[in-house]
Image (tube, grey):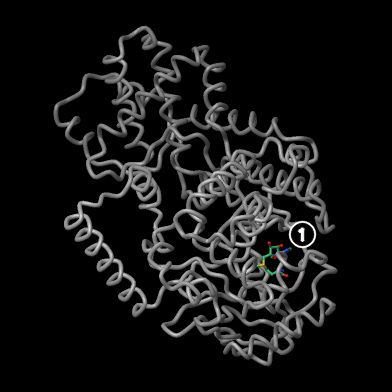
Amino acid sequence: MPSFLQESQIFVSWLSTVGVTMSPKITVSDLRKDHQGRGVVAVEDIEANEDIFTIPRSAIINVSNCSLIEDKPHLSQKLLKLSQWESLVVVLLYELKVKNNDSKWLPYFNVLPIKDTDNYFFNQLVHWSDEDLSALEPSLILERVGKDVSTQMFNRLYPKIIVERLGLHELKGVTIEEFFSVASLIMSYSFDVERPASLEEKLQAEDQEEDNEEEHKIKSNEEYPSEDDDEDEDKVDEDELLNGGFFKSMVPLADTLNADTTLHNASLTYSESGLIMRSIKPIKKGEQVYNSYFDHPNSEILRRYGYVETQGSSHDFAEIPLAIVRSIFSKEYSVSTEFLDEIFQILNEIVIADDEDGESAEIVLDSYDCFKTREVILEFVFIIQVLTIILAINEKEKISSWNHEEMYKMVHRVFQKCYQLVESKKLTNKFKANFEKILKERLKAYPQIASEPYTKEMAFSRAQMAEVVLKSEYQSLKNCLEIDETFKNGPMGTYKFIEDEKLIRNIMKKRAPEDSDKDNKKRKL
Ligand SMILES: C[S@@+](CC[C@H](N)C(=O)[O-])C[C@H]1O[C@@H](n2cnc3c(N)ncnc32)[C@H](O)[C@@H]1O
C-alpha cells in the first residue's frame, strides 16, 4: 500500500494529467505532526496577487461534471431538481461506491478522509458522542450540531429519491454511517463554485424546455403527477440546484489548503474556464498557504470542520439566549415572565404591522451575538433599551394590568422613541446597567476553565477543542462587558448616555400630531 507521502505524490502527478497547473513555488506537505493532515506550503517566496494554481472546470466534481452523468445522462434534469447537498451526495456516492477504483478521481479520493481512514478521521460535531458534546456546555452551538438534519436528509434520499426517483438500484445498500461520512466530507471540503455564464444559459434553457414538455404532457395526456411526486417537488423547489448560480463542488487541490482566520493569505477566484487560487498577500518561503472558510467563530469551525483555532478565531462571538434577557428583567423589575412574553409578542406584532417593505428586522430573537471585536448586534441593544424603558414606565403606570390594545399602544410608542434614540447614537444609563447584568449572568454559566487564557498547546482532543470554544465565547463576552470601550470608538461607534427619566418624560407627555408622522417613518435595524 502506498505511504502517506506516496499518495501525495500520486495525487500531485494526477493533478497535472487533469489539467491543473501548479506554481513551482508550492508543494503539498505532510502536516500530520501539527494535526493538520496535508496542506500547501510555499517553497519559495510568493508575492501578493500571484496565481498559485489553476484548475480547469473539467477537474472538479459536481452535478454537471461527474461519472454519474457521463454514464446516465438522462438523469441530468432529475438531479437538477434536487438540492445542492442532495445532488452532491448522490454524485459522490456513485463515484465512491459504484465507480470505486475505476473513478477518474481515485488519486484524489485516496488523499481524502473518506478513503484514507488510517491518517484521517472525521471530528465534526455530528460525530461526537453525547458525552463529548457535554464538554461544550453552555455554548449554543449544541443547538446546531446537525444530527437531526443529516438524518432527515438520509431519510429523504433513501429509498425515495435514490432508488425510486433516480432508479439507482446499485446504491441501494448505502448505510447511514456511509452517508454521514460523505455528508461530512462535503461539509468540510466542498466549495460553492460559481457557474460560468455559458453553462448558466444552457441550464436555464434546458429547464425551460423541460417545463414546457411537462406542461404539454399534462395537457395532451391528462397525465398528472401523483400526489406524492407533487409533495416532493414542492419541498425541494426553493432549494433547487438551479437557484443561486453555483454548484456545490469538490475541488481537488483547492481543498488541500487548510484555513486560518488570521493567517489567511490566498483565495479562490472563478473564471469562465476554471478556478484560480491566488495569493492575497506576500507568502514567505516555508509558510503555509491558508484559505479562509468564511467568517466563522471557533464554535462553528469545530461544528463544520472538526478543529479549532487555538488562539481564537478572528470572528469569535458568544450568544446570549433570550431566556437570560427574560430572567434578568423579570428579577430586576419584579415582573412575571408571562408579562415579558406578552411584551415580546407585542414587539413581534409591531415589527409585522410597521413593515412596509418586508425588510424590518425582528428584534425578539432566540439569542443575540456579542463579538470578540466588541460588536454587539443592534437587535440586542434595541431590545434591552426598549425593555428598560417599558419596565420603568410599568413601575409608575402598572402597564401589566392594562388590556392588550392599551399595552400595544404604549409598547409601540416606547419602541418608536427608543428607535429614534438608538438611531441618534444615544442610550440610557439604566440600559448600561441592564446590559452589564445580562452579560455577567451569561458569563456565570461558563465553567472556570473558560475564563483562563488560551494556552500555547495545540488542541487536538475533543475535550481540549471544547475548552478552546468556551474560552473563545467567554472572551467575547468579557470584551463586550468593557462597556465604555464597547460603546465608544469600537465597531459600534460612539454612544452618548442620557438619563432614563428624560426619555420617559418625553414618552409620557401627550403626543403632538406631527410627532406621530415622524414616528411612523420606516425603521430598519
Ligand atoms: C479542506 S480540508 C483541508 C485539507 C486537509 N488538511 C487534508 O489533509 O485533506 C479541511 C480539513 O482540514 C483540516 N484543517 C483545515 N484547517 C485547519 C487548521 N487551521 N488546523 C487544523 N486542521 C485544519 C480540518 O480537518 C478540516 O476539516
Above or below 497: residue 181:
below
Front position in the image: 502 or 68: 68
Query: Quadrant of the rendered structure where residue 227 is?
Result: top left
Q: Mark 1 points at which residue?
A: 121
Q: In which quarter of the image is the C terminus?
A: top left
* 57 left or right, relative to 460: left
Asked if the beta carbon under badge 1 is closer than 8 A to the nearest atom of ligand 1, the reply is no
Front position in the image: 525 or 186: 186
* 213 left or right, relative to 151: left
* 511 left or right, relative to 433: left
Above or below 222: residue 355:
above
Tell me the residue at 30%/49% (across/down). 225
Give the residue at the far top of this rendering: 401
Q: Tell me where residue 468 appears, x and y as whole percent.
A: 75, 49
Tell me the residue at 62%/80% (across/down). 104
Q: Tell me where residue 85 appears, x and y as whole percent.
A: 51, 58
Give the residue at the far front of this rendering: 221
Q: In which quarter of the image is the N terminus?
A: bottom right
Quadrant containing ligand 1: bottom right
Disc 1 secondary structure class: loop
Tell me the residue at 22%/59% (across/down). 217
Q: Tell me where residue 442 appears, x and y as whole percent.
A: 64, 32
Q: Which amino acid does label 1 sit on?
A: Phe
Q: Tell me where residue 165 appears, x and y as whole percent.
A: 44, 55
Query: Quadrant of the rendered structure where residue 43 is?
Result: bottom right
